[in-house]
Amino acid sequence: MHIVVIGAGVTGVTTAWYLRKAGHEVTVVERREGPALETSFANGGQVSLSHPEPWANPGAPLTILRWLGRRDAPMLFRLPAEPARWRWGMEFLRECLPGRSHRNTLAIGHLAAWSGRLLYDLNMELNLSYEQRDRGVLHLYFNNSDLQHGIKQANLIQNIGIGAKVLTAEQCVEYDPALASCMSRLTGGMLGDDDESGNCYLFTRQLADAAAKAGVTFRYGADIERLMPENGRITSLHLVDESGRRGAVTGDAYVVCAGSFSKTLARRASERLPIYPVKGYSATVPVRDASRAPTVSITDESHRIVLSRLGDALRIAGTAELNGFNLDLDANRCNALTQWVEDLFPGAADLRAPAFWAGLRPTTPSNLPIIGRSRLPNLFYNTGHGTLGYTLACGSAQLLANFIDGQPPQIRYPMWKGRR
């Protein structure tokens, strides 16, 4: 079967890889000039199996209320808001109910655990090199309330099969001496020792190269003008390149992996996807003093900021801003990232010329990725991964490949079934 994959971010490229491994002819269509140039380009760099809890959880509404009025708040709902943002926000609040949040956490956790195993196998097969580190992700807690919540989360993910160890402040510093500078403030930590960190951009490009060698066709610089439905199926994609030249690509089936733009494509097939583009920021800075810079990837739970060591640089990322498809850099939110790294790891980073970046995370209210079939029998989705695209990419792609081939699922996950 010839399958056309729309989008060459980390989700689209992994989807192409696993579909090709299943024996399909695969063409990837990407509007940018190469792979991983949007949301996958400069994200936080974490493969964080140990963080399956969705943003929508019972504690989220009160936390968000405390952040109101702060321009550097970890989550910012900008006003005035269009109807789609209000609708997404209301659906988000519904997913904060304890039962829904627990169900979503388990679903993400099972997908994450499986995805981590597949990523390990992929690295063994291809020997990829993308500045990865296998020291895990260390979640830091700066008050007892967060620590107690972390202990509960550690117990939950251990039952799923994900490695997690609760550490004292002293044990955190023993694991990474760079944390000595903030030990007096630390209450404790949780080490996700099945996690890793790495450069998602390099990972995606190298996997795209491997996929091309395996026979996947990539068409870059090809923006999708419209999907062409006919007699209840998609028959072709109409494309336009940067010079305005038009063309088309046809296949037996089509997979939408277009990030935040997936919603627009689905609408052309008369389907509504509950995805909103949530803007995240990152700052990439050179390491100034290696002895003061952590070598384990860090998650600061209270500030919703993550840090990864990528070669001789630090990548600091975080915040969530709901402001449509706006990609403007807000100085307050950018500066919050560099101030954070200097506060916790003084002197570790060269902050004279940070490389700031913003990307749009395709986020569902539940944080569950949309994986499955649309209302049309030959149109499929693998999208809506929010902050966990890098973490869940391999598992999501293999899950969809199995689904398309009619194979029984290897994990329990709520597959998408088309809806209006």
Image (cartoon, rainbow, N blue to C red):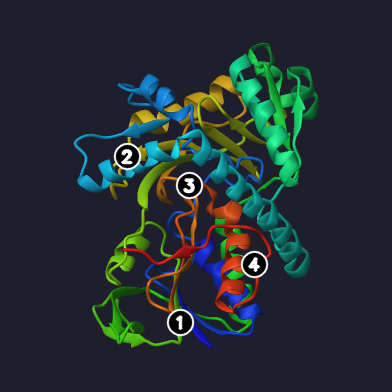
Q: Of label 3 and label 4, which has the lower sequence position?
A: 3
Residue 32 at what x, y percent from top left?
Answer: 39, 67
Point out the frontmost of discs 3 and 4.
4
**Measured from the top left, where is residue 326 in percent x and y?**
28, 47
Q: Residue at x 41, y 49 (%)?
A: 359
> Quadrant location of residue 51?
top right
Graded by Cα atoms within 10 Å as few (under 14), some (14 to 19) or many (20 or more), the crowding at tag 4 reads some
Q: For the residues marked 2 and 1, what is the alpha-carbon distance in whole angstroms? A: 34 Å
Residue located 30% across and 63% down the image: 264
Residue appearing at x 45%, y 60% in the figure: 37
**At x 61% / y 45%, what residue is drawn?**
106
Which corner quadrant of the image does residue 286 belong to?
Answer: top right
Instruction: From the viewer's side, name the closer residue of 205 and 81.
Output: 81
Could you tell me the amino acid type at mark 4? Pro
Among the two numbered marks 2 and 4 on one chain, the one whose residue lies closer to the N terminus: 2
Q: Give the number of the disc on residue 409.
A: 4
Observer able to see residue 139: yes
Q: Is residue 135 visible?
A: no
Q: Earlier in the sequence, mark 4 or mark 1?
A: 1
Q: Which residue is mark 3?
A: 367
The amino acid type of the residue labelled 3 equals Asn
Mark 2–mark 4 Cα distance, whole angstroms, equals: 31 Å
Q: Which mark is residue 90?
A: 2
